[in-house]
Image (cartoon, helix red, strand yellow):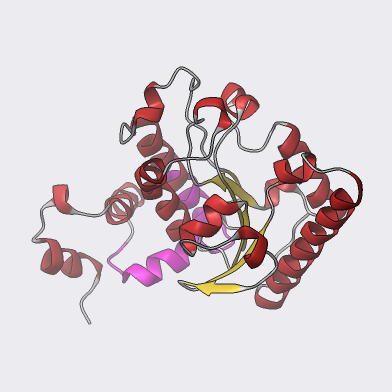
Amino acid sequence: MENFANKIVSIFGGREIDLPQNIKILMDLKKEYGIEEIYYSELIKRIHRKDEQSLKLREFIKIKVCELLYECRECPLHLADCHTQKVPGEGEWNSPLMLIGEAPGFEEDRLGRPFVGRAGELLTVILNKLNIDRKKVYITNVVKCRPPKNRTPLASEVKACSKILELELEFISPKVIITLGSVPLNYFKPKSSIVQSRGQWIYERGFWIMPTFHPAYILRQGGETLKRVKWQVWHDFTRAIAKVKELNGDYKFN
């Protein structure tokens, strides 16, 4: 089997401009830290070790992904009046659990952080009740720029932002993903209904995916509907956490 460098040459002819972004980032990583030639899969495993060196490697990758995000001009959202800054994901880059929302809202755009408005406060409450430190999971959105009037992101916007989300998925390599709302659900399973799919496990691309309602949806409910939806979301979260513990029982969420 070819080693990492030879594989790059054989596939891409050594032309750096043609390399996928994940390969470019890993080549920069190897150069920065003087890492010997190893297979791609071995390098990904090294990133997820629990030592100080691996922590530095993850921080390097995080910075590179954020740089790509800030440079992105792939869709018109970066020029929209409602948009003041891009909102990267945040949290633990070694977490077995990733939460994916739809797009930033007003407060997220203002502060440059995901899930910090009313929906974010509710999400934090849910995590706290599960004895989970929010900093110990990774939280992101499919689209990183706020759409006008907080509308649902367009397919073209999702496609443009998918490059960043794919890098997050590649380098964080979560065991379990909780999708919050229809947009992240349809990212993995196009044309799916959140009402019909919520609470049903999806195994896609090596990820265990638990679709559930977006916290903003909970906030729009009242009466008996509110009680039902809150219970459904709680049930989905508890099942997702149980799956994480089944697959990666030694990970500490607090």
Main SS, magenta residues: helix
Q: Is residue 45 magenta?
A: yes
Q: Is residue 71 left or right of residue 232?
A: left
Total residue callouts: 0
The residue positioned 69% from the left and 46% from the top of the image is: 135
* Residue nearest the observer in this picture, 108 or 170: 108
Residue 127's x, y, as percent? 79, 51
Q: Which stretch did the figure color magenta?
A: 36-60
Residue 226's x, y, as percent? 85, 49
Residue 137's x, y, as percent? 66, 53
* Residue nearest the observer in this picture, 43 or 206: 206
Q: Is residue 177 magenta?
A: no
Quadrant for the N terminus in the image: bottom left
* Residue nearest the observer in this picture, 110 or 10: 110
Q: Residue furthest left?
A: 13
The residue positioned 77% from the left and 37% from the top of the image is: 121
Q: Is residue 111 left or right of residue 58?
A: right
Q: Is residue 68 above or below residue 134?
A: above
Q: Is residue 158 left or right of residue 113?
A: left
Specify whether residue 250 is in view: no
Specify whether residue 233 is in view: yes
Residue 190's x, y, as percent? 46, 62
Q: Residue furthest bottom?
A: 1
Q: Is residue 153 left or right of residue 140?
A: left
Choose top left, top right, bottom left or bottom right for residue 23: bottom left
Choose top left, top right, bottom left or bottom right for residue 228: bottom right
